[in-house]
Image (tube, rainbow, N blue to C red):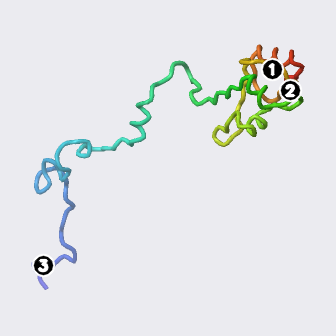
Amino acid sequence: MQLNQLKRVHKNKDDKRVARGGKRGKTAGRGTKGQKARAGHRIRPMLRDTIKKFPKLRGYKNQSFEVKPQPVNLDLIEKTFSAGDAVNPATLLAKKLVTKVGGKMPKVKILSTGKLTKKVTVTGCLFSATAKRHIESAGGTVE
């Protein structure tokens, strides 16, 4: 066997170098222009565009997702509850005066619109100062 008769087992082939002339020059197989033709391209998620449409709120660490209490007026309590009843978020939910928020028991605030003549016990609720005065003047208790 002579040196000129030796042959390689594998062909002497280099990897293609993209975007350096030859068969893959200029656009380097990326089509033409646009976001996808750029190096290190990342397509922005659609959710990002949705988030950016919402206006920003003023202040530092503003509580934009805080659940506000549901208002219940004294005239509704007067209509739906009888004397001596307990008024709390569970009983208000049972009588459909408030609704659940995210599957949880709602916060309730009792407001002073209307008059209360019945003696009721209010527990586990927020209330305005005027509403507290009306409930106590009717003989009820606030806890």
Left or right, 6 with respect to 55, comes to left
First in sequence: mark 2 vs mark 3: 3
Residue occupying the point 71% across, 37% down: 96
Residue 143 position in % (x across, y down): 85, 25
Residue 102 position in % (x across, y down): 63, 40
The foreground one among 103 and 74 is: 74
Disc 3 to disc 1, how far (Cα)?
A: 113 Å
From what the image shows, is residue 21 above or below residue 107? below
- The amino acid sitting under disc 1 is Leu
Left or right, 67 with respect to 11, comes to right
- The amino acid sitting under disc 2 is Val
Residue 141 position in % (x across, y down): 88, 23
Residue occupying the point 73% across, 27% down: 76
The numbered dot on residue 125 is none
From what the image shows, is residue 24 above or below residue 126? below
Disc 2 to disc 1, how far (Cα)?
A: 9 Å
- The amino acid sitting under disc 3 is Leu
Residue occupying the point 20% across, 50% down: 30
Task: Residue 9: name its quadrant.
Answer: bottom left
Left or right, 87 with respect to 93, comes to right
Question: In which quadrant will I find the N terminus?
Answer: bottom left
Tag nearer the camera, 2 or 1: 1
The foreground one among 34 and 65 is: 65
Q: Which residue is mark 1?
A: 116
Q: Which residue is mark 2?
A: 120
Residue placed farthest to the front in the image? 79
Asked if the residue under mark 1 is in contact with the one under mark 2, i.e. CB atoms within 8 Å, the reply is: yes
Asked if the residue under mark 1 is in contact with the one under mark 3, i.e. CB atoms within 8 Å, the reply is: no
Secondary element at image label 1: loop
How many residues crowd mark 3 within 10 Å: few (<14), some (14–19), many (20+)? few
